[in-house]
């Protein structure tokens, strides 16, 4: 609430609700309220009223703060706020409801005390009891349930003024002044005691506030240091994040280049493998054709040898020269030697052709093995390139993922 509105509320309470009258004419209206409270106690709490009469405890000794400060001196604020709300709604008579509720809830404890104990009980235990919101709520419910009519309060007010007039008429001026002096001295002692209690509470509250302020300053310094560290960490994190983003972009570019390079190498190796396969298939076909031609030539030679009577006697079925050959007659010796020489020449030619055919066959097989070896190397290179590219890509993805996870945490 702004200060202007709070001051307007104070003026309203002091003038329109009659709280200012309590401070006027030597607190005459306040003593009237004390008399009304004692008469209400006599009606609602007679046993406590009688006990106070026995110990000599009067209402002005414990209830002055209730009327003058609206319970704000000792009681917690949430209870005071409720009382002021009721005061604004129903008038100053609400103070009697709250005062009777306090006395009624504390009756059992007060009856067991003497004069000093009762005053001490009103100063400490009573306000302490209503620091609990539950107890304060029960007290306000009891105060609202008590019905005090305005006619009854007016009646008690008239009784008070009548008694005051009678006392003034009966008492001598000296006795009246002495009695008033005693009352004022008692009020002064009570106010001094309350002043001491308030001063003690003020000093204690100042010490507590000083400690709280020191603790708050220490916490503020610690929080400022943590804030500076956090800001520095934030700046470092942002720099690290930018660096990692740049590295991630570079890695992505490298991965893209490696991927393009690998794809081109795969295409190149694929074309090379296709050419190798084509060459191998062509060589295989040529080898098969050559072998088939050689077999045909061998079959033809074998058929000629078998068809010739002289050759069949010199060669066996496997094409080898027989170990022993029967001697021919002397008359045809020269012819036989010439024939043998011719056959030997043919045999050497056939063996030479056979050796060349075998040599071509071995060369073809060597070429096939060489091509298969190159094909295996090319496949291994392709697999290694695929594996290397895959591992690089996977490791870069893991690195980027791990770094981003750290930034997130």
Image (cartoon, helix red, strand yellow):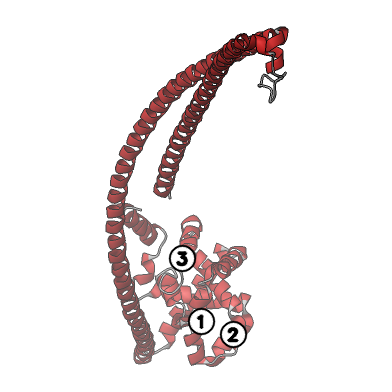
Q: Residue at position x 50%, y 30% from top?
A: 373
Disc 2 vs disc 1: Cβ atoms closer than 8 Å?
Answer: yes
Kindly tell me whether residue 110 is visible in this rendering: yes
Q: Secondary structure at mark 1?
A: helix
Q: Is residue 224 above or below residue 328?
A: below
Question: Would you name the residue on which mark 2 appears?
Answer: 109
Question: Depth check: 234 or 67 in front?
Answer: 234
Question: CA–CA distance between discs 2 and 3?
Answer: 23 Å
Q: Earlier in the sequence, mark 3 or mark 1?
A: 3
The label shown at residue 80 is 3
Q: Residue at x 43, y 87 (%)?
A: 170
Task: Tell me if residue 35 comes above or below residue 394 in the rendering.
Answer: below
Query: Above or below — where is 334 with respect to 77?
Result: above
Disc 2 versus disc 1: nearer the observer: 1
Circle 1 Cα neighbour tier, 10 Å, few/some/many (<14 / 14–19 / ≥20): few
N-terminal of the pair, mark 2 or mark 1, is 2
Between disc 2 and disc 3, whose residue precedes?
Answer: 3
Give neighbour class at mark 3: few <14, some 14-19, many 20+ (Cα, 10 Å).
some
At numbered mark 2, what does the secondary structure look like: helix, strand or loop? helix
Looking at the picture, how far across and down is residue 220, in whole percent? 30, 64
* Residue 125, label in figure: 1
């Amino acid at each position: 609430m702004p200060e202007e509105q709070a001051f307007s509320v104070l003026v309203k309470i002091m003038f329109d609700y009659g709280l200012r009258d309590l401070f006027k004419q030597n607190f005459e209206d306040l003593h009237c309220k004390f008399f009304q409270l004692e008469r209400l106690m006599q009606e609602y709490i007679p046993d406590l009223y009688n006990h106070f009469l026995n110990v000599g405890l009067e209402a002005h000794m414990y209830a002055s703060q209730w009327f003058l400060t609206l319970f704000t001196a000792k009681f917690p604020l949430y209870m005071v706020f409720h009382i002021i709300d009721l005061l604004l709604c129903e008038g100053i008579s609400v103070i009697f409801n709250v005062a009777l509720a306090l006395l009624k809830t504390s009756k059992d404890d007060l009856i067991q005390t003497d004069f000093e104990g009762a005053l001490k009980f009103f100063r400490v235990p009573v306000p302490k009891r209503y620091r609990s919101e539950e107890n304060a709520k029960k007290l306000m419910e009891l105060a609202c349930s008590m019905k005090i009519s305005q006619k009854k309060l007016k009646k008690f007010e008239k009784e008070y003024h009548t008694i005051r007039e009678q006392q003034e008429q009966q008492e001598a001026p000296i006795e009246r002044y002495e009695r008033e002096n005693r009352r004022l001295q008692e009020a002064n002692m009570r106010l001094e005691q309350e002043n001491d209690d308030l001063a003690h509470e003020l000093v204690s509250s100042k010490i507590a506030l000083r400690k709280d302020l020191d603790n708050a300053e220490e916490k503020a310094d610690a929080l400022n240091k943590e804030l500076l560290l956090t800001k520095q960490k934030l700046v470092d994190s942002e720099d690290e994040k930018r660096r990692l983003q740049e590295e991630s972009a570079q890695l992505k570019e490298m991965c893209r280049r490696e991927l393009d390079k690998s794809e081109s190498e795969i295409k190149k190796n694929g074309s090379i493998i296709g050419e190798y396969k084509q060459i191998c298939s062509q060589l295989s076909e040529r080898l098969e054709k050559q072998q088939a031609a050689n077999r045909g030539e061998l079959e033809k030679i074998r058929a000629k040898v078998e068809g010739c009577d002289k050759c069949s006697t010199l060669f066996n079925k496997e094409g080898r020269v027989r170990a022993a050959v029967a001697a021919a007659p002397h008359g045809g010796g020269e012819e036989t030697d010439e024939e043998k020489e011719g056959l030997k020449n043919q045999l050497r030619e056939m063996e030479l052709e056979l050796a060349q055919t075998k040599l071509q066959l071995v060369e073809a097989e060597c070429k096939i093995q060489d091509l298969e070896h190159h094909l295996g190397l090319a496949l291994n290179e392709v697999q290694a390139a695929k594996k290397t590219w895959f591992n690089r890509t996977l490791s870069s993805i893991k690195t980027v993922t791990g770094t981003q996870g750290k930034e997130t945490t």
